[in-house]
Image: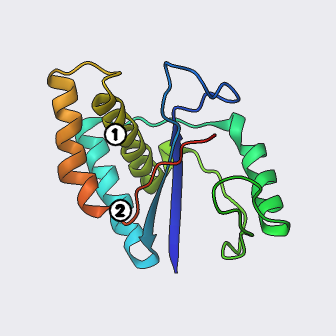
Amino acid sequence: MRFAYMDEAGNTGRKLDDAKQPVHLILSVVIDEEKIPLVHEHIRKMGRRHCVVADEAKEVEDTALRDLANYQEVGTSWGWNPEQIDHIVDTIHFVPSHSNGAIQLTDCATYIAARVRKIRAGTVPSGRSAQAIEELWETRIDPHIWHDSVWHPG
């Protein structure tokens, strides 16, 4: 079995044309069940060395749970290829990110993925911070990407 850990960045709610948030990114980290304890231990070690802090988004939980139930029952009504979500057998489980290494990993990867897109789009200035983000993206995230796509609404 595989577990999918999801996070988002750049959520502006219904204000889809917010110039300060040109990217709304949803990222999933998929981990084989037997590797989850290794991920949690690695994140705990990183936290002890570097003090990892992650966030939590209570405001989206109810909407996400309601949407998934609807997608499972009648399908999606958006995107270029609407479909019924029949391959997710359980609901979404929200956990505090500070207590779950895989969620912390996903939170960090999501931040870096959104940030690198903003750097490349020119909405974030270049400099040492941007170089560090680019390096993290190229060495730690990009080599492990299975699928990466951008959907432009409208």
In the picture shown, does residue 73 fall above or below 61? Answer: below
Please tell me the numbered disc located at residue 39.
Answer: 2
- Graded by Cα atoms within 10 Å as few (under 14), some (14 to 19) or many (20 or more), the crowding at tag 2 reads some
The residue depicted at 20 percent of the width and 25 percent of the height is 129
- Front in this rendered view, residue 83 or 36: 83
Residue under the point 27% across and 51% down: 45
Using residue 102 as the reference point, say whether residue 144 is left or right of it: left
Residue drawn 48% across the image and 34% down it: 23
Amino acid type, residue under disc 2 in the picture: Val
Instruction: Please report the residue visible at 49 percent of the width from the left and 28 percent of the height from the top.
Output: 22
Q: Position of residue 77 (x, y in %)?
A: 77, 55
Using a 10 Å C-alpha cutoff, classify the residue at mark 1 as few (fewer than 14 neighbours), some (14 to 19) or many (20 or more).
many
- Decide which of tag 2 and tag 1 comes sooner along the chain: 2
User: 92 and 23: which one is in front?
Assistant: 23
Quarter of the image where one finds residue 90: bottom right
Residue holding disc 1:
112
Relative height, residue 42 to residue 127 (above, below): below
- Residue 69 % position (x, y): 81, 61
Q: Secondary structure at mark 1?
A: helix
Instruction: Using the image as rendered, state which of residue 2 and residue 137 is in the foreground.
Output: 137
Give the spatial CA distance, label 2 vs label 1: 18 Å
Residue positioned most to the front: 154
